[in-house]
Image: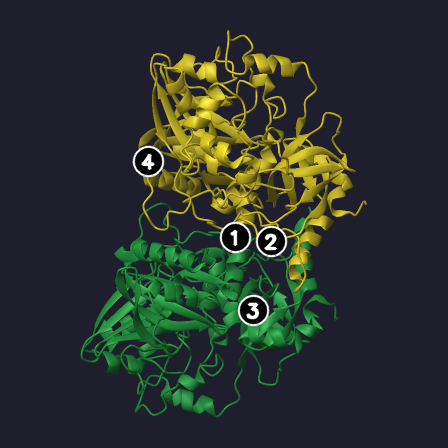
Chain colours: A yellow, B green
Amino acid sequence: MSAHSLEDIIQQEGNIVNRLRNSKIGMYVYPVVAPEFANWRDEQRAWRESAVLFDQSHHMDELIVEGPQATEFLAYHGINGFGNFDLNRAKHYVPVTPAGHVIGDHIIFREDEQKYVLVGRAPTSDWLLFCAAYGKWNVRIKHDPRSPSRPEGERVLRTHYRFQIQGPEANKIFTEMNGAPIPDIKFFHVDWINIGGKKVQALRHGMSGAPGLEIWGPYEDKSYILNAILEAAKKAGVDLVRCGSRAYSTNTLESGWIPSPLPGIYTGDGMMKAYREWLGPESYEASGAIGGSFVSDNIEDYYVNPFELGYDFYIGWKKDDFIGKEALLKMKEQPQRKKVTFEWNAEDVVNVIASAFKPGEDHYKWIDFPQPNYASSSADMVMQGDKMVGMSMFNGYSYNERCVLSLGVVDPDVEIGDVLTMKWGEPETTGKTSTEKHKQAEIRVRVSDTPYSTEARTNYADSWRTKASK
Amino acid sequence: MSAHSLEDIIQQEGNIVNRLRNSKIGMYVYPVVAPEFANWRDEQRAWRESAVLFDQSHHMDELIVEGPQATEFLAYHGINGFGNFDLNRAKHYVPVTPAGHVIGDHIIFREDEQKYVLVGRAPTSDWLLFCAAYGKWNVRIKHDPRSPSRPEGERVLRTHYRFQIQGPEANKIFTEMNGAPIPDIKFFHVDWINIGGKKVQALRHGMSGAPGLEIWGPYEDKSYILNAILEAAKKAGVDLVRCGSRAYSTNTLESGWIPSPLPGIYTGDGMMKAYREWLGPESYEASGAIGGSFVSDNIEDYYVNPFELGYDFYIGWKKDDFIGKEALLKMKEQPQRKKVTFEWNAEDVVNVIASAFKPGEDHYKWIDFPQPNYASSSADMVMQGDKMVGMSMFNGYSYNERCVLSLGVVDPDVEIGDVLTMKWGEPETTGKTSTEKHKQAEIRVRVSDTPYSTEARTNYADSWRTKASK
């Protein structure tokens, strides 16, 4: 019997973990944008040392939510407080399930009294599209799904272009572009600036303390805006480096946001079952891949909650109700895992790489540079002796730090500075096309703060990463 | 004064080597095709172990040469013998300068008495376009330049699609596709086969002894043909792996063809000067990049001749005349460098990589996997003690061989099995955007035959690559 929904698939296949770990969807790619404009090392360096231009036009879903109940609808389906959500402000919007598990996250912009724009991965857009229908809300939603992963020369259009300019020299470009110093926009607030002959919306953003703006507008203006930015950088004498798709996703390793938690929607009855019946067999949730050494029969073991990801300070406890409130109130009283950065031991990383130079021998899972992820959601076991004390969830090499880093969660009693062991690679050969056959390696990881970059600067002295310390 | 031609640039800038070594054109990319369909390790493995599907529709110029003098024109501008050039046959077409230096190469197909199709890099198409005008030949030429390197979502169209299917299991797909065993096409001959409801032209090709076909037709049929191939492979039970742009260019390391010799067109008077006046400032020849440790003030030191590349057996000595004949006759009497494969020492490669894990220290030139080239033409010094005895010209990691390989030329007295030292990385920081700042490394290389793969299988026993032998 052919499956018409995620729920059908679960009923037919039993263990959904098995399906996701054997997904044939391939790499989760950052599509359309060229792999490299310069080279990925210098593209990474640019956001630390000069300025970088990210083209974010293609890799995210966009949702426009409008209508008399837009605010009420969004407030009810996200954990965030909405009390201070003035016009021209943005938030990091996080929906959870009734059980309190994170579904995903979007950046949400309030454009008007009754109009919001949201951008991010599919799980949040899918959820909101479902909720609008399920709850009979008086909202209109326009969904612009992310660009195809492999367009192979076919034209790709979006509703909006979206650029981000970041780095210590970024302000010089903004001033040149705007014709005068830009307004003093507060973090995660939006204002209008001039780019060439156009007024565009700009969100004050920023990574690792460096100033940054995210700007967007109609997709047909993309070429004009891009060229105006490049010309402004030239006039300002700033080495603005365009960032390609290979380096793009690694920027989060230094800033500490985990883009890819597994949406906690595979379990639960009532609304959750209805959601799984609504989700098609080709949806992100039904076709995405889980990769990594952590294998559990219980899909819930891959879930995370807002406390673990450090999103608890967003929670709008004062709201009368929102989906997940009750569950989060209970969680609040319990000890929670915490988000950390794992700093991979250089010696162990180099040993893994060296194994790919031994003809006739099995080798460890190849660490692809700068982005070694091989699934939509990664889950690698982090061990203290025989005990799993953490889960590594998003990997990448940072040329700025000369180190492979990953983001994940650890048990409450794990401390910054602890040296743990990560299992790298999968215990068996899965059906995933995104990884070659390999054996598992052990890589020592040092638990570090998130965001990592600040912490790293103050702790360079001991240079643990490059010394053996078995 | 603005430059209107390559010749203007040379007059204005003096040393053209300096310009090309500082080109800002970026990586020489394999455009439009997705970076990976599966993962580049398994994509490489497929051409050795099952079957691979290359999409060659985008990375090559195509030239259609027609007219009463088509044969005469092409025979005069290439070194190849044309006596046996029957219909439905293909050749590896090599034009040289009057001084006998290789300009480039194309695959040339004879489609009709008066019609040829050529595909390959820009230097050969540019040269033929010029020659047709310069010599007042009675030919019509249609030029379809390769696809843009970074289309960023704009649609890309070509005249023809072009696929290649290779590997030990390829024949099963051909039979399934054709509805019966395909005709017994001789190597580099063309015949018609069935794909779905269409008859398409197929060139018998083959890499490392495995059977292969290259097929092409109108670009609008691309999607139909692609899907018919994939369905046939499925029916035939063959694991046909689509090869992405990251792995694509590395297939030549195992087969031994050097795709990127620097066109020998920067020197010479008369016709050559006229050519440089014809070539625009944005042409491949004027804007391309030279990368590598070999730096000479004399651009001619980067040139190669047909003897060095192993193309001397193509030469149509019986032809009355062709451009370069006189020079090649003289060269024939002199000792010549020879084409070899350099097998990079694993320990040295791993040391280079390990240097990228030492914060605060200078590092060696990053070896990007699987394709470390960072210029349109590569030239790395290969040393025997203090003496340069070879030039490494095209690099790549082979997952099949678990080894970085490069192709290049060595002095006549260098022997297979000799262990030489390659200088990896550039002596100074150039203007190239394709490489990060780095220091030079020394990498031991063992001189091996081309094609490498056959040789390797017979010489695995000593496993030199993975043992220290300083």
Residue A158 position, x and y percent, is: 34, 36
| Gap in angstroms between the C-alphas marked 3 and 2 | 25 Å
Q: Are marks 1 and 4 on the same chain?
A: no
Q: Chain of mark 1?
A: B
User: What is the number of the mark on residue A219?
Assistant: 4
Q: Are marks 2 and 1 in contact (CB under 8 Å)?
A: no
Residue A66 position, x and y percent, is: 34, 18
Q: Are marks 2 and 4 in contact (CB under 8 Å)?
A: no
Nearest to the observer: residue B118 or residue A306: A306
SS class of the residue under badge 2? Answer: loop
Residue positioned 31% across, 71% down in the render: B118
Q: Nearer the viewer, mark 1 or mark 3?
A: 1
| Gap in angstroms between the C-alphas marked 2 and 4 | 41 Å
Q: Which residue is mark 1?
A: B39
Q: Amino acid at mark 3?
A: Ser
Rendered-image quadrant of the C terminus of chain B:
bottom right
Of all residues shown, which one is farthest toward the right?
A470
SS class of the residue under badge 3? Answer: strand
Q: Could one spot residue B284 in this view of the protein? A: no
